[in-house]
Image (cartoon, rainbow, N blue to C red):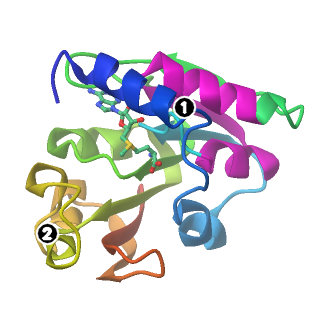
Amino acid sequence: MGAGDRDRWNNKWAEARGGTGHGSALVDLVEPWLPTSGRLLDVAGGGSHDSLLFARKGLAVTVADVSDVGLIQARQRCLAEDLMISTVEVDLDTEELPSGPWDVITVANYLQRDLFAGLVERLVPGGVLAVIIATETNLERHERPGAPFLLEPNELPLLIGDHDVLEHSEDWRPNGRHEAHLIARRSA
Ligand SMILES: C[S@@+](CC[C@H](N)C(=O)[O-])C[C@H]1O[C@@H](n2cnc3c(N)ncnc32)[C@H](O)[C@@H]1O
């Protein structure tokens, strides 16, 4: 990613108007480990419905993303249901994520390899990280996302580092994509 990310994603989210028409599979993936209350950080979650789905569950949601357009869409979607979320505009190429600590951190469809070890450090002891990113196998059926945005086979647990991986699988999913799904926990 580079300096043009903000403009590029602002244009994409503006064209999509309300952002994505659905969430990722994040909520279903992390549901068994979700606390009933607490602070959740959705990394690169601008434009997505995921923040709304987590806010509906009573979590205090913060979305961090480079796109102010995507962040406005996330806030407005929640406000339409009288739910408040926080947003942080941040270019993760050059800036740090908010330090937290967070009870839950989620990442869907955003691959920045040097980010992951630092994510676990931002969790409270016992806190949970949930990640969904497509793998290179996805290219067998789809031209996009291109290779720079795709994980190598079984790469994701290595990026997380020395933490409890509670769940990791790579497969074709109901959305038609080949995705890595991972849940990791920070040691207590
Ligand atoms: C493919 S979308 C995924 C959005 C959402 N997580 C989902 O699954 O629908 C990638 C997101 O990453 C954000 N993004 C791209 N480059 C970024 C950067 N350098 N720093 C922070 N966010 C970035 C974009 O604005 C966009 O919202």
Q: Is residue 6 above or below residue 166?
A: above
Kindly state the secondary structure of the residue where label 2 is placed: helix
- Circle 2 residues within 10 Å: few <14, some 14–19, many ≥20: some
State which region is magenta: 49-77
Camera-nearest label, 2 or 1 = 2
C-alpha span from label 2 to label 1:
27 Å
Horizontal side of residue 94 vs 34, given as left or right: left
Q: Which residue is mark 1?
A: 63
Horizontal side of residue 12 vs 7, given as left or right: right
**Quadrant in the picture for the N terminus:** top left
Q: Which mark is residue 136?
A: 2
In the rendered structure, does residue 75 fall within the stretch colored magenta?
Answer: yes
Residue type (three-letter) at the residue carrying disc 1: Val
Q: Residue at point 41% right, 37% down?
A: 44
Residue type (three-letter) at the residue carrying disc 2: Glu
Q: Residue at point 18% right, 51% down?
A: 149
Could you tell which of marks 2 and 1 lies nearer the N-terminus?
1
Horizontal side of residue 74 vs 121, given as left or right: right
Q: Is residue 147 visible?
A: yes
Q: Is residue 14 above or below residue 55?
A: above
Kindly state the secondary structure of the residue where label 1 is placed: strand
